[in-house]
Structures are given as structure tokens and as C-alpha cells.
Image: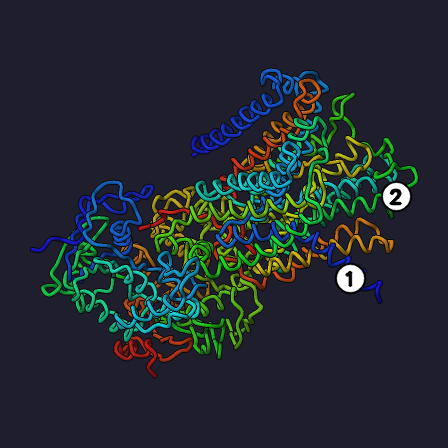
Amino acid sequence: MNETLAALAAITVLTLVKATPLIFAALGGVLGERSGVVNIGLEGVMTAGAFAAVIVSGATGSAIAGAIAGVLAGAALAAILAFVATRLAYDQIVAGTGVNIVALGGAAFGLVLIYGQPGASHEVPAFGPAGERVLTILAFVLAVALALFLSRTPWGLRVRACGENPRAAAAAGIDPLRTRFWAVIAGGAIAALGGVYLSLAELDLYSDGMTAGRGYIALAAVIFGRWSPIGATGAALFFGFFSALQYTLQRAGIPSELMQALPYLAALVALAGFAGRVRAPAADGVPYVPDNVRA
Amino acid sequence: MTAPVLALHGIRKRFGAVLAVDGVDLELRAGEIHALVGENGAGKSTLAAIAFGAVIPDEGTIEATAPVGLVHQHFQLVDRLRVWENVLLGREPRRGWRIDRPAAYEHVRALAAEHGLDVDPDARVEDLPIGVQQRVELLRELDRRPGVLLLDEPTAALAPTEIASFFRTIQALAANGTAVLIVTHKLQEVIDYSTCVTVMRSGRVVATFDTAATSTDEIARAMVGGELPPLAARETTAPSVRLVARGLAAGDGAGALHDATFEVRAGEIVGIAGIEGNGQSALADALAGVQSYTGMLEFDGAPMPSSMSPSERLARGLRVIPQDRQHEALVLGWSIAENVALGRHQTPPMRRGIVIDRNEERAAAQLVIERFDVRPPNASAMVDALSGGNQQKVVVGRVLGAAPKLVIAYQPTRGIDVGAATLVQSRLIEARNAGVAVLLISFELDEIFALADRVLVMSGGKFAGSFERASIDRGRIGALMAGAH
Amino acid sequence: MAAFFKLRIVRDLGVALIVVFGVGSIAMLLARVSPIDGFSALFDGAFGTTSEFAETLVSATALLFPALGIALSFRAGLFNIGAEGQIILGGLAAGVAGYLVPGPPVVSIVVTLLAGAAAGGIWGGIAGYLKAKFNANEVIATLMLNVVAVLFATYCVNGPLHFPSANEGETPLLARTAWLPTIIPDTRLTIAFVIAVLLAIALRFVFTRTVFGYELRAAGEAPDAARRAGIDLGRVAVLAMTCSGAIAGVGGATIVTGVLHRFNTGLSPGYGFVAIAVALVGNLEPLWIGVAAFAFGILQNGALSMQAEANVPRDIVNVIEGLVIIALAGRRVISARRST
């Protein structure tokens, strides 16, 4: 009996560890998508967050400084997507894919430049167990805060309006381009915390490709969670559970690759099962182009 | 003469190749209900958008001494949000960092009561019928206490009783000093409710009238710049039944089709009259095969179940002129020729094995260009460079050129100039003369009356009445459209 | 009309060139290398000798296959971001089939290419089916499938498909009869290059002349009008994604049979992603994509020399490619069929 309790406790802890970066990324995705911008570039944002955090932590000796740097780096990368998606009205999916490639390549380039070796950085000062728990709690707090923001505050209302019908928002005197721009950047900052957790909490270094598709799973969590912060958090926990399961089941002799694939397969199933039945914000992914009145 | 509240001088605006507004002067004074009329493509909607400030003109000045509000033809509402959220978007009452919901609710309730508009502030816009949605749009503008209120085709989606109540609201506003501009093509409403009229044609102001001193005929003549070209003559035909529907139902929510029972014969035009949003789209989509339905449908004696694909229906000779040519009929980035092939590309002669026969395609396109006077008369021209009227001619031409047995024409002359509209209508009559069965769905009663052999009235998703051409009763039809029995 | 077309290509290519030379120079300066040294190492590495030029064409070929597949899916309004996984599985299938099916070279070559096409096609088809049946977002689906493909291939090659004569994480070395014949002796440039070029020409024919291409383009540019015109959007989605995956799979197969002569999980250094940039630079037109693939081949191949000779980390090329994708995301040819 004690053994099962211990096992359950272990899985719960592991689930939270695996889910925390997903929650951050999913929340960032929710904010952007509710304003009308699909951020395929979350993967790149997490990468940028993870990399910048390690660099600055290594240089300053402070994990907190690293975390702040990570957030800023993620926001900066998201700003590129934000600009391209709003002012230029470029295709958001294609631009997001580009952002991911830039981030991965930039981090790899930076690794060689700064550490003189490809593949991974040195170990740097990171968050201990206390810091990890603080970050996890922060994730949940942000989820609630984002939910309140969207449903109760004026700015949240305007974000939702821009995501549903930007033309209507414009008719009400709101600038959809500016709202979307800042929503994507804020979303990037939140998502970058997921990267920071990966490199400074779960581990204490950066390695090539460490985000391993989590940014994409986070997008599936957004859909699965019906674009609500609480729902997306729940979905992220669900996917994190599958990640945690992989470690437990590995000891049962099941091939590790199959287990590693579990969260991604879960995401696929979620897409198939839920995609048709939920409604995205109506203008999600559709570039807004003002002054479009025809005779 | 009092000073104008809104003055436009020398306005010019070009969209690509089209000169939408060509040197317009317009003045609005407090208390007047100013009608702006013109046929489709005359530039009235663009002028209203410019007056509001949504569109920047290439030349000209706009002077407004009071705030300007605009109620759009296609509402700019966020469907998923509530009424009060839409009305107060951008100016929400606050308590600290949150929205003060009780205050917002009360504010909107009071505003609605002040103007005599019946609407529930807490309802979600997507759940409201179109007529009520318009009130929300109106409230949003009224909350800003505009000195000038612009309305673009405000009664397009209203039932006759709602229209009367709408104009009572407008007249109260005007009596209170608001300057009102109504863009419309409904001349009877212009005569009944406006104080003055400005007529636009081809981007210019061609006439202004004092409403009291003019008539619908005079306004119509100014709009068209002469007499209307005549429609093709009707010939006698020997009708045999082509389409039978019994108890057809499709869709759900507002605008659903509940119970359609009717017949269409070869060589006749059946006109379905009704206000937009009463099930016409569900009916058209069901017949086209893009919306599932229950009930019985028979085409040429053979059953046409809901599962039959659009491809199969086209093969049997059932063709549709859709309501929205830009999204439902044309591929804007393609040439006229490639668009003419669309819908005919799956069978010979357009299809030759795995390849599209380019010669066939070009020949068919030439035929359409000639029969329908498409300009520019170049089969390789990109369709998105064509005017609305020419685009519609391509769509109608390709449908009629495919030797159809039944044509469903849904708003076939929507948003096109009078010349193109008359040509399209004449071609439909000629098709009817040649034995094609035509089901005409239109929101313009004049069009129905000009073309139909029989008129059916749709209201609330059901068919409410049937009239032969010889015994059309306008009053009764209007009442049925509004929901009478 | 032709002049206008050229103008837009010129403008977009101009942007791409600015990104390449501008960002490249900045990166080189960051690496404390003069841009002149850096770029001359790059171009020297791409053209310097016959074998280096051949190697550039090898890179170009490896990019051309997935780029053609991606272009096909883009024209249908679908984003196939999963070319990477399709390349890997196509390569795996070719590596195994080439080993298991002996015979004269013609048989081997056909079998391995078909195996690659089948594996890639199935993988792409899964995403297409999910889209058609459930309206599932094919971007996320293909991205998930990418990761699963790598894991699946690793599992297979170390488990059920592990042959005694193979190294860890690889399939056995293929018999010489299964190797694609080279067209420049003593280089790695094989008939794969010819196949790719022929495929580009064939794809152009499909787009401009065939009924399938016509329906595919209609589904991509005006889905509602296409549906009403009798086009089965679900069928187009499945076929487009399957063909797209199959073409990428053939690319993976040619890497295995032509370059590595065995399958290895690292056979694609991100070709599936770079190919997106290639497809965009080529404006989704097969022949222009060929030209773009050549340009990117220069970058990819030259980057290795740039790293070896001038000490500029080759990853900067990825950054440049990503920026090119962002810069060209405004191409009007892209119009997606939005789903959740």
C-alpha cells in the first residue's frame, strides 16, 4: 500500500515537472491565439528562452538573472513574429516555422561562439528544487491570472474582440494590429518561461533541440483546452502525465522510443478527437488588413 | 441656411482600376434625414465609409463639427460576445482592474430604453435574430452620442413591421438634432421617411431633391440616367415537373429550413420571395449538396438524397448561381477561362482523360464573353480585376452555358450595376424559354415580380404562400414575408 | 503580365539575397571572421572543384525532392511541415527494401524508390486523413508525426529491423547493385539529380494541365467555390498530403541509395525544414523551385567549407534560411485552408 502511494506521489511530481514548461508555452499560445495570431513559433521562443537563460546565468552566476534574460529573449523573438503577422500581414504559420528555424540555428551558432563546442553548453547556476517548485506554482498562478485577464478586464475583452472579429474591434475604436502585436509579445514572454524551466530548472544547461517539440505539443494543448487558459493548463497536465508515464513504464521493459512517443501520439489523438468539435476564435490565424472597404 | 454638421468637398477615391468616388460634394444638416441613393457600384457605401473616417480619400476634405457614427450594412459585431460587451467595447466602465459588469449592464439597458430599442444586454449576439443584432450595432454608435449618424442599407434585413419601428427611432433622433444619412436603394422608404435625397451615379452626384417635391420615378430615372433597357420577352412553354421537394428541412438555429414543399417545372421560373435569414441559404445549400437535409427531394423523377455529392448533382444537370460570387463561385486568382471550366471540368468535353482540354476551355470562355458582354473581353484576364458586374456575368454565363436542367439562382444580381443586372435577368428568361427550370431566390421583390411565373413566399423557414404571375398580391406577399399567416 | 511576374520574383529574391549577405556578414563578424573570407570560403566550397560542385548539386537534389512535395501541399492549401519525418521513413524503407530485395540494378532501384515513396506517402497520408476526416490541424499533426517518425525509425533500426551486419542505429550497407549510378564519376552525384529534375517538370505539368492539379489548386485557393463545383475537398487533402509525403519519401530513399548507401537516423540535417524556404523562394512553381534548390544547395554545401576553412559555425546558414522563410511569408501564393 505504501508502495503504491509512493509510486503515485512520484508520478504526480514527475507529471508536474514535465507539465510545467508545457503550461507556460500553452498559456503563451492561448494569449496569442485569443487575439487572433497562431504562434507556431512557440518552439523557437522556448528555445530562445532556454538558451538566453543559460548564457546569462553562466555569465552572471545568477539563475534569476538568467530567467529574466530568457523571458526577454523569448519576447524579442516573438516580437519578430508579431511584427510580421500584424504590420506586414504575412502568413503566420510560415513565419512561425521560420522563427523556429532561426532560433534553433541561432542557438547552435551561439553555442559554438560562446562555448567553443557544438551540441551543449557547460553547466551553469540553476534553480534548485525550491526554485523548481516556485516556477511550477508560478505557472498555475499565471493560468488563473490569464483567465481573469481575459474574462474580467477591459484589455482582455479587447483581446477577445480582436481574435473574433478585428473589423468590429476597429469599428469600436480599437487598433487590432496593436492589440495583436502586444498579445503575441506577452505570450512569447510567458512561453519563454517554459524554456527557462527546461534549461535552468529541470536541468542546468542548454543542449541542441532540448525543447523536442514541446512548443508544438503546447499548441495541441491550446486546441484540446478550447483556447481557455484553465483548459489549456489541464491539457498540458494531461500531456505531461504521458511524459511522466514514459519514465515509469521504461522500467517495465517497453522500448524507450515507443514511450517517448507517447505524448506526441496523445497530441495526435487529441487533435483528431477534438478538432472538429471546438471553435477557435473566429479570426484566429487570419491576417487583419485595414482599409479594406470596397464600393 | 444653418451650417452643416458634416461637409464633404471634392472627395475622390480610387480602388485599383475602379474610380469609386469621382469628385463629390455633400453637406448634412442637423435634424435632416438625408437619403443617399444610387444603383449598385455607384459609390454610396464608399462615400459613407469616407464620411465616417474608415476610408481615407485620395482627394478632398471632410469637416465634421460633431462625432460621427456608422451603422454598417454588414454588422461589425463580435458574435461570441454579449450585447453589452459589444456596445461598450473600448469604453468599458471599470472598477479597479476589472470591468464593472452591473454598471455596464445598467448603462446599456438605460440606453436601449432611451431610444425605444428592445434588446437584452446580456444576450450573446450570435443568438439574436438579424433584426435585433442591428439594434446592437445601432446602440454601439448611439452610445457615443453622435451628432451625425450614417446608416448603410439599414433595412435590408428587416421585416416590414421592424422597418416602421426602425424609422420611428430614426425620426426621434433627427427631431433631437442628429443629422442622419441613410444609404439605401429602397425608393419607397426614401419617399416615406427622408427629408432630402442625393442621387449618385458612377461615383458622382447627379441630382439632389427635396423629398416632398419628388417621386420614386424621378429618383429612379436619375439613378439610372435614362430608361431601363427592356427585359427579354417571355414565351409560352410546356412545363413538365423537374424538381419536387416535400418536407425538406435543413440546418438549425436561426435561418434554418423547417418544411419546404414545392415543385419546379421545366420552362418556368419559380421565385422565392422573403427577407434574408428566413431559410433561403439553408434551402440553396441543401439543393446544392453542401448542407445535409431530411425530407424528400426528387430530381427528374429520380430521388436526390442528402448524401448525393455536389459532383453528382452537377452531372445530373442541377447547377447553382451562388449568393457570394467571390467566395462561393470564383477563384479570384485565376483567369476567366479557368473559372469558366470550374464545375464543368470533371466531364468531357472539358475533361480529356487526365488533362483539361485547353481548347475547349478557351472556346467555352469565349462563348460566355460574347453572350454576356464580359469586359474586358479577354479569356486570359484575371477575374479579380473584373468589376462585380462582369464577375457575376462570368458565373451566370458558365452556369447557363453548361446546358443545365435546373438552375438555382440565389441573388443573381446582388451588388451589380443595372446594365449587368438586366442582362443577367434577360438570359435567365431566355433559359426559361428554352426549357430550363429556374428556381430564383431573391431579396429584391421587384426582381421576383419581373421574372417569376410563380411566386412562393418564405418566412421562418417555411413556405407561406403561392401566387401565380397573373394574380400577384403585393400587400399579401409583404404580410406573409413578415410572418403573417 | 510576364513583366509584372518577373518584377515580384526580382523583389522577393532581392530580399532573400539581402538576408543572406547581410545576416551572413553580421554572423561572420561576430565569429571574428571577415565577411570576405567567410563568403569566399563558402562559394569556394560550393564551386571550387568539380567534386565540390557535384556535392552542391547533391545538396540541391536532397532539397529539391521535399521542396516539390511541400509546394504540392501548399498549392492545395495544406501545410506539410512533416517532410522531415517523411524523408526519414522513406529512407528507412529504401534501406530495408534495398537490402532484402536482391536483383539487377534496375529492379533494386525501382524497388527502393517505390518503397521510399510508399513509406513517405503513408506518413503524409495519415496527416491528410486526419485533416479530411476530423479537420485536424495538419501543421501540428505533421509536426507530431515528425517526432514520432524519428522515434519509430530508431526503434525499428535497433529492434525488429536490426540486421546482424549493420552498425548500431543503421541498416546494413547496401550491395553495389542497389546503389544509384553516379553521373559524374568519383562524386556522390547520382541519377537522383536527374530524377528530381524530371519530377519537377512532371509536377509542373500536373499543376498546369491535369484535372488533379486543377482541383488541387482550386481547393487551395477557393475551397468553398471548389466544393460547390463538385470537388471533393477531403479526397484532395488525402491525395495531396500522400503525394507530398511520397515525393519527400523518394528524396529520403535517394539519400540512402545514392549517398549513404545505408539508412541512418541522421540522414537528414533538417532538409525537410529548409525545403520550406526552397519552396517559398521558388514561389511554389516547380521549375523555379529547381533554381531555388540550387541556390540553397550552394548555401548548405558551402557552409561546411565555411566552417572548416574560415571557422564560421555552419549553423548560421540555418539562421539565414529561417529568416528567408520569414521574409517570404508574405508570398501571395500561400493561402491556407484554415482549420482548428
Q: Position of residue C56 (x, y in %)?
A: 68, 25
- Disc 1 is placed on an element classified as helix
Q: Nearer the viewer, residue C325 or A216?
A: A216
Check disc 1 and give the amino acid type.
Answer: Leu
The reply to whether dot 2 and dot 1 touch (C-beta < 8 Å) is no
Of badges 2 and 1, nearer the viewer stands 1
Residue shown at the point (45%, 78%) measured from the top left: B261
Q: Quadrant of the N terminus of chain C?
A: top left
- Within the image, what quadrant is residue B482 found in? bottom left
Determine whether B231 is above or below C114 in the image. Answer: below
Residue that label 1 marks? A8
Residue shown at the point (35%, 43%) measured from the top left: B376
Q: CA distance from mark 2 to mark 1?
A: 36 Å
Q: Position of residue B9 (x, y in %)?
A: 17, 45
Q: Nearer the viewer, residue C290 or C165?
A: C165
Determine whether A140 is above or below C20 in the image. Answer: below
Q: What subunit carries mark 1?
A: A
Residue that label 2 marks? C162
> Callout 1 environment at 10 Å: few (<14), some (14 to 19), or many (20+)?
few
Q: Quadrant of the C terminus of chain C?
A: bottom right
- Disc 2 is placed on an element classified as loop
Q: Kindly tell me whether residue C202 is visible in this rendering.
A: no
Q: How is the image coloured?
A: rainbow
Toward the bottom, the furthest residue is B485
